[in-house]
Image: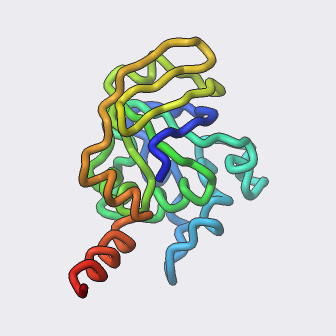
Amino acid sequence: MNPIIKGKCWCGYDSMTVYEIIPESHWTMDRIDPEKMSDWVLETVLPEAVENPGYFKNLGYSVIVAGKDFGCGSKSVEHPMAALKGAGIQLVLAESVSRYSYRNAINLGLPVITCPGIMNKINTGDMIEADLHEGYLINQTTGEQIQIPPLSEFAEKILNAGGLLEYITILGKDESR
């Protein structure tokens, strides 16, 4: 994973549930299919997405900015975070994140950073550059530099491997030597 992420932001709100990220009716149950599920990301939030599969994905956002308790409302389901990845999301910045959604995102290789007050500093459409290793973000639209928590060493290892399963595979190969 490149620790520097650049992209266009879409701003959500407080208490955005996993069911708002992608309705449960579109969760692929036989296996998680991020590409297939990405067609329905934010369908319940953006009315235009209902009749237009891939609508959110085609808007070109790569960063989700959200308020408090992002990804709440369910127990441990990976589908919403996988769907965000399938839709091209490379980073989630939120004031706080449900612990299940946080772990699922990291385990799937999607970086999540909790940043109290972030909703007051970024608007939908803003372009940002974030350094997840050093812990800073530049809102390229406004010029403001924002301190963010850097990724933990363990989260960075998982993300560098491409997700938890890949990380475990690498560990297994290292132990067999």
For residue 10, above or below residue 49:
above
Q: Residue furthest bottom?
A: 176
Residue drawn at (40%, 26%) of the image:
136
For residue 14, above or below residue 41:
above
Residue 74, image quadrant:
bottom left
Residue drawn at (60%, 53%) of the image:
41
Residue drawn at (50%, 39%) of the image:
4
For residue 93, above or below residue 58:
above
Q: In this orientation, which residue lies closer to the viewer: 44 or 137?
A: 137
Q: Position of residue 159 (x, y in %)?
A: 39, 56
Residue drawn at (50%, 22%) of the image:
138
For residue 32, above or below residue 61:
below
Q: Position of residue 79 (x, y in %)?
A: 47, 64
Q: Residue furthest front?
A: 177
Q: Residue furthest right?
A: 52
Q: Is residue 150 left or right of residue 128?
A: left
Q: Is residue 156 left or right of residue 52?
A: left
Q: Position of residue 43 (x, y in %)?
A: 63, 50
Residue 126, image quadrant:
top right
